[in-house]
Amino acid sequence: MKSGYNRIRANFAKALRQVGILKYINNAVNIPEGIITAKLMADVVSFALKGDIQKVIFYSIAILLSTILFKIIKLCLSVLLSRKDKCARHKCKMILYNQIFMSPMYLQYKKSGGQILENSTDDLNTIISLYALLYPNLFIGIATVVLYTAFLGMESVLAAAALPVISLLQIIPPLVVKKYMQINYSNSREAEGELTDFTVAAYEGMATIKLYGLKEWYLEKLTSVQNKCRKFVQKAELTMAEQNAMETFVDNILKYGMYAMIGLFVFLGMISTDTGVESIVLAGGLFPAMLSIFNCIPQFALVKKAEERLSIWFEFSKDGSFLFRDNSEILKVEGLTHKYGEKTLFENVSLTVGRCETVIIKGENGSGKSTLLNVICGLEKKQHGDVIFGMDNMLWGRKIIYLSQNDMDYNFPAKELIEMIDKSSVNSELLSEWGLSKEAIDETDISSISGGEKKKVYLAVALALNPDLLILDEPSNSLDSDAVMMLKNKLQMREKATVIVTHDNAFDSLSSKIYTFKNGGAEVGCGR
């Protein structure tokens, strides 16, 4: 896990370096501003007590000008910081997206849309805050406390010791809420991801909900998920409210206690009036600096939780598939075994697919055929055995195409899908061959066309791209007899490898090698 954390930080640190430096500078400007203002304020009070009006006016103008100067400096830094921050956040998103796309497909396959959304928003923003907020607040906060204390120490050791000591009261609220913030962070992210998935599922399945009168059922389930999410959010809000209440209480103690303490020191002659004024002015920067240091304690805990949630994308292992240049075979499966808990779905399955060969896999429902394809394609993690591809590199969508029996729904027409994939290889005319109307191709979203039309779209695109290895899971589902015959003819004309999982005997004549799943294994026989 440590290596995963290190990889996460190494990936994001470079993108956030400039933002971090600007944040350090922006925070550091407050240090000389505080010291200069404290010194000038002490001079104003000193000359006011002596009745020297001209010098009071002079130093008052000096305070005004220095304040304006520092405000201009901080304004310029803020504008620059805002621009750099937006660019850096975009780079960090690209880094995370790249890691997600580079990860084994079984990781992407098992993560829900809501979980990935939470990873790429709240979790990512929490980690960005480590460099853009927490580190600058921590180290500049420490520098502020040290330099202000050293400045006061040159005037009075008593004042220099008193302010940092009394400010230690601020550590109580962050320490109290640290544990609860960690728990609430994880629970809130999971609940919000579940709510996102449930909402998207309703959007995609609205027709089914209406068709079967599931409105009441859905709303009841949605209320349950919302209540779960609301419960964690309320706990998080309560935790923050408790911290704010404690901080307000401590802040009042510090403010009025500090005034009373400094006044008492001046009254007893333990420190000078100038030192007392400087202490009061510097306390306005020292206390927030100390508080920012203490507030980093629970925030670092949240960063750790966010890193735990993102670490899956940065410390993945290989999916078990590897490449091997072979002139005769494009796919070789050796000794694959897959279990769900104590149940063995299939055991010691081996098969081979030649470069221009069509292989058919049959078996009863639940025998593990689709799971075998998911393992071969990396959608499920390989447990035992080897998957070997006989090619120089694996280019999904080009050299290898896998069409599962569950066709994807997209909220755009098939024409846009063609434009995104490869207009040179696929065109609308190829879809028209399958009997698809111009309206279904150009205007209707893929999610809104019928199951048969959807299947035709994906089969037409896959066959047009002509991959070295085409893997089809129940390709005849939702197809009428004419479309099945057309598919059979096109597969018969293919001069490259094809793997078909099917219960349909119509494809048997395409292959001389039919694997049948029986009793957790695969037996090979001859085609008709």
Image (cartoon, grey):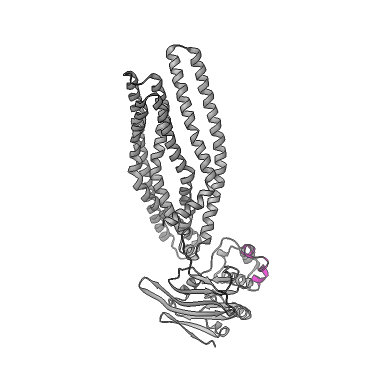
Q: Position of residue 33 (x, y in %)?
A: 49, 29
Give the x, y percent position of residue 208.
48, 64
**Residue at image point 51% right, 50% down:** 12
Question: Percent from the top left, x then y, of residue 190?
Answer: 41, 55
Question: In this orientation, which residue lies closer to the viewer: 523 or 483?
Answer: 523
The residue furthest top is 51
Q: Does residue 171 appear to the left or right of 109 in the view shown?
A: left
Q: Is residue 272 above or below residue 463?
A: above
Q: Position of residue 512 (x, y in %)?
A: 55, 85
Residue 382 in the image: above or below residue 297: below
Q: Is residue 510 visible?
A: yes
Q: Is residue 198 visible?
A: no
Quadrant (top left, top right, bottom left, bottom right) of the N terminus: bottom left
Q: Is residue 316 above or below residue 70?
A: below
178, above or below 273, in the image: below
Q: Which residues are magenta?
A: 415-432
Quarter in which the C terminus is drawn: bottom right
Q: Quadrant of residue 490?
A: bottom right
The residue lying toward the viewer, choosing from 55 and 372, is 55
